Image: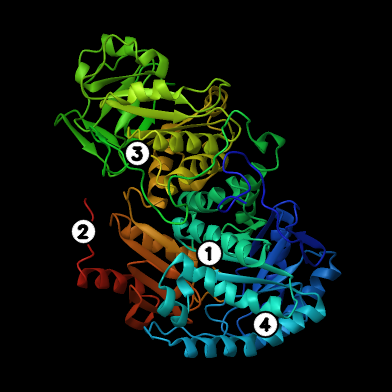
């Protein structure tokens, strides 16, 4: 295996051990399984059974139920019995934190248990403790002593186990030696896996979850490399971005993290963690998985094999580029709005991409999520643009324009070298990566690269488009070509969620690799036609019946936000709710978002209980965490600021906390 995948140029799933979970087999070449987790109180048997059934009927192949203490673990027997009596045999998974006794009870009842190595034996007090080698070994032995009984019970009862590391809940011991890193996440899981293997127990699935897709992807890659080196075999992998949030942002963040790994053949089961009802997670899971169920995803033999990567896939380094106007160098990636499908662009059309014109004052209002360029069709615009916006068009359209400074030509590589009229500052060159059996020659690329005004627009018609564009970017690196890259991606799918997932994967995966100085999202001709009656954009309340142009623009900025490459809005790290949640999570998230969504760049975590916070909110600036029924504790980073506040006033107290730490600005009227 090369690095972490069977192939970095074609789609080919990595081979993992098959693990039996009840009547379901995960890994070993079986289909990618989809799952979710209940949000009900596990002691409310009737409500939990009803929700499990809704999840199963939505298509869940496994359903996880929280078991925070012995009584919930014991009640799993009642839940399972009622489900079986109704004819439902879908495997159940017990979610365990802090309570080994609960895990041991659950393992005798249901098909799978999930343990978090960060808090199963270790405690997390956010203390920096130095361990000698001897002390570290002693702690490992303590874990072995406490973990072994669960392993033996699972082995006896044929129960599967997920060793689920979460970035935000690494133990103080792991943190003291490895820090808050992907390597620490891997070692946290490997300690438990080594113990299980020493007891000849192998019914294990692993996960490396984080609310940051960058950290998540790196951790899974490192885990694969570590298992390969240490055991010469791989255990199945459960993929998920923890605390992804809700609506559009949650879907984009999940698709980037999960999809980046699926593209390289990694992943045997997935869960999309949304702050929504659990059955709503399943359609998103299905949209992700179906991309890899089609034979056409087998790849394209026109993409050259890769011998060696010119960068480390286990850490983020942005590709080094020259700056061409406001693209490349150390500047944030630009957003290009594709308006080429509009026959005559009007001033009002720019509202969807962040620009509103006031005719009375003759001024433009520009939002934080305003596109930097627009790609137009065959007709120049008949009005003056705001200073922050420029146009990309065919050379013939540029020559017709009354403001040549604002118009930048775009042509293919072969045409560019013979182009008579070029813009003195910025020109765009299209490259369709490896779609042709005679790909662009190195000599032509090097000739184009002599021009410091060129920005390359990379796209691909290959089935494995992401891998093709990545391979072309690597070819540019190998040739030491430092022209900036705009990632151009069209979607041929039909629904809003399908478009979101497609864009998030094919551009987000590359941005996580450090590839991309801009993005341009569009739809195929058929998809544009299908959207004419609004069928693509309706049906999801998180788009508020927005136009297609607004959908594409919002998605572009959402992808940049999720990959941490351009911050344009407040980020919410919101857990998906479960039976441990101590307040109405969806309602509270909406309330907090309503009063803080103008705080650009701030990261606010909204966690239902102490299990998901403060640990799981990892890199949030401020946290809102359930600490008891109707009680909230507020954090700055990982430090408690206000404890056990009445939930009726907690949002107001959060605003006061933001003000106390100079993180608040008054919203504009």
Q: Position of residue 118 (x, y in %)?
A: 52, 78
Instruction: Kindly state the secondary structure of the residue where label 2 is placed.
Output: loop
Locate residue 626: give its quadrant. Answer: bottom left
Q: Nearer the viewer, mark 4 or mark 2?
A: 4
Q: What residue did someone put label 2 on?
A: 666
Q: Nearer the viewer, mark 1 or mark 2?
A: 1
Question: Between marks 4 and 2, how big is the CA–CA gap?
Answer: 48 Å
Residue in the image at 28% along x and 21% along y: 408
Up-down relation of residue 470 to residue 609 (above or below): above
Q: What residue did someone put label 4 on?
A: 103
Q: Position of residue 25 (x, y in %)?
A: 78, 60
Question: Between marks 1 and 2, how big is the CA–CA gap?
Answer: 35 Å
Kindly tell me whether residue 75 is visible in this rendering. no
Instruction: Kindly state the secondary structure of the residue where label 4 is placed.
Output: helix
Task: Looking at the image, tell me whether mark 3 or mark 2 is earlier in sequence order.
Answer: 3
Q: What residue did someone put label 3 on?
A: 517
Task: Looking at the image, tell me whether mark 3 or mark 4 is earlier in sequence order.
Answer: 4
Left or right? Give the position of 50 relative to 240.
right
Q: Position of residue 512 (x, y in %)?
A: 44, 49
Residue in the image at 45% along x and 71% along y: 168
Question: Between marks 4 and 1, how big is the CA–CA gap?
Answer: 20 Å
Q: What residue did someone put label 1 on?
A: 209
């Amino acid at each position: 295996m090369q690095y972490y995948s069977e192939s970095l140029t074609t789609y080919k799933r990595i081979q993992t051990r098959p693990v039996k979970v009840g009547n379901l087999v995960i890994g070993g070449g079986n289909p990618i399984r989809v799952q979710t987790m209940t949000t009900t109180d596990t002691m409310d048997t009737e409500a939990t059974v009803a929700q499990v059934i809704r999840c199963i009927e939505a298509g869940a192949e496994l359903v996880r139920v929280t078991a925070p203490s012995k009584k919930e673990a014991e009640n799993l027997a009642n839940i399972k019995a009622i489900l079986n009596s109704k004819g439902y045999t879908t495997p159940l998974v017990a979610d365990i934190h802090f309570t080994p006794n609960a895990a041991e009870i659950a393992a005798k009842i249901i098909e799978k248990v999930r343990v978090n190595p960060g808090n199963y034996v270790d405690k997390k007090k956010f203390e920096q403790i130095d361990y000698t080698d001897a002390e570290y070994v002693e702690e490992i032995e303590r874990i072995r002593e406490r973990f072994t009984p669960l392993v033996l019970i699972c082995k006896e009862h044929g129960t599967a186990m997920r060793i689920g590391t979460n970035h935000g809940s690494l133990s103080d011991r792991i943190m003291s030696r490895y820090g808050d890193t992907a390597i620490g996440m891997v070692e946290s899981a490997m300690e438990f896996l080594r113990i299980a293997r020493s007891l000849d127990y192998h019914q294990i699935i692993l996960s490396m979850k984080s609310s940051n897709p960058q950290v998540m992807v790196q951790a899974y890659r490192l885990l694969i490399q570590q298992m390969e080196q240490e055991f010469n075999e791989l255990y199945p992998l459960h993929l998920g971005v923890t605390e992804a949030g809700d609506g559009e942002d949650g879907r984009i963040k999940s698709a980037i993290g999960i999809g980046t790994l699926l593209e390289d053949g990694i992943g045997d089961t997935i869960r999309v963690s949304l702050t929504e009802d659990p059955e709503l997670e399943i359609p998103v899971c299905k949209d992700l998985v179906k991309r890899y169920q089609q034979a056409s995803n087998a790849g394209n033999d026109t993409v050259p094999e890769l011998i060696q990567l010119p960068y480390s896939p286990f850490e983020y380094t942005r590709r080094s580029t020259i700056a061409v106007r406001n693209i490349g160098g150390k500047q944030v990636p630009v957003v290009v709005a594709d308006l080429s499908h509009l026959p005559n662009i009007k001033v009002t059309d720019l509202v969807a991409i962040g620009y509103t014109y006031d005719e009375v004052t003759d001024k433009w209002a520009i939002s934080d999520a305003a596109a930097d360029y627009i790609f137009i069709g065959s007709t120049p615009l008949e009005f003056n643009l705001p200073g922050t916006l420029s146009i990309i068009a065919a050379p013939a359209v540029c020559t017709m324009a009354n403001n040549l400074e604002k118009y930048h030509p775009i042509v293919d590589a072969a045409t560019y070298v013979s182009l008579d009229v070029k813009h003195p500052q910025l020109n765009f060159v299209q490259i369709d990566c490896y779609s042709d059996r005679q790909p662009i020659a190195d000599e032509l690329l090097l000739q184009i690269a002599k021009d410091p005004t060129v920005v390359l627009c990379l796209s691909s018609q290959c089935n494995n488009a992401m891998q093709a564009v990545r391979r072309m970017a690597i070819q540019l690196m190998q040739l030491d070509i430092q022209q900036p890259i705009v990632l151009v991606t069209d979607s041929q799918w039909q629904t809003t969620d399908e478009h979101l997932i497609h864009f998030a994967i094919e551009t987000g995966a590359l941005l996580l690799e450090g590839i991309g100085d801009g993005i341009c999202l569009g739809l195929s001709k058929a998809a544009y036609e299908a959207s004419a009656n609004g069928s693509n954009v309706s049906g999801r309340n998180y788009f508020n019946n927005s136009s297609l142009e607004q959908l594409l623009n919002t998605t572009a900025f959402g992808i940049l936000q999720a990959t941490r490459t351009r911050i344009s809005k407040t980020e919410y790290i919101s857990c998906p709710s479960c039976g441990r949640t101590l307040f109405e999570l969806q309602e509270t998230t909406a309330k907090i978002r309503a009063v803080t969504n103008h705080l650009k760049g701030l990261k606010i975590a909204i966690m239902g209980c102490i299990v998901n916070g403060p640990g799981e909110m990892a890199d949030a600036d401020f946290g809102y965490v359930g600490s008891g029924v109707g009680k909230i504790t507020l954090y700055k980073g990982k430090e408690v600021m206000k404890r056990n506040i009445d939930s009726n006033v907690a949002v107001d107290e959060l605003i006061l906390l933001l003000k106390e730490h100079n993180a608040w600005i008054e919203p504009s009227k």
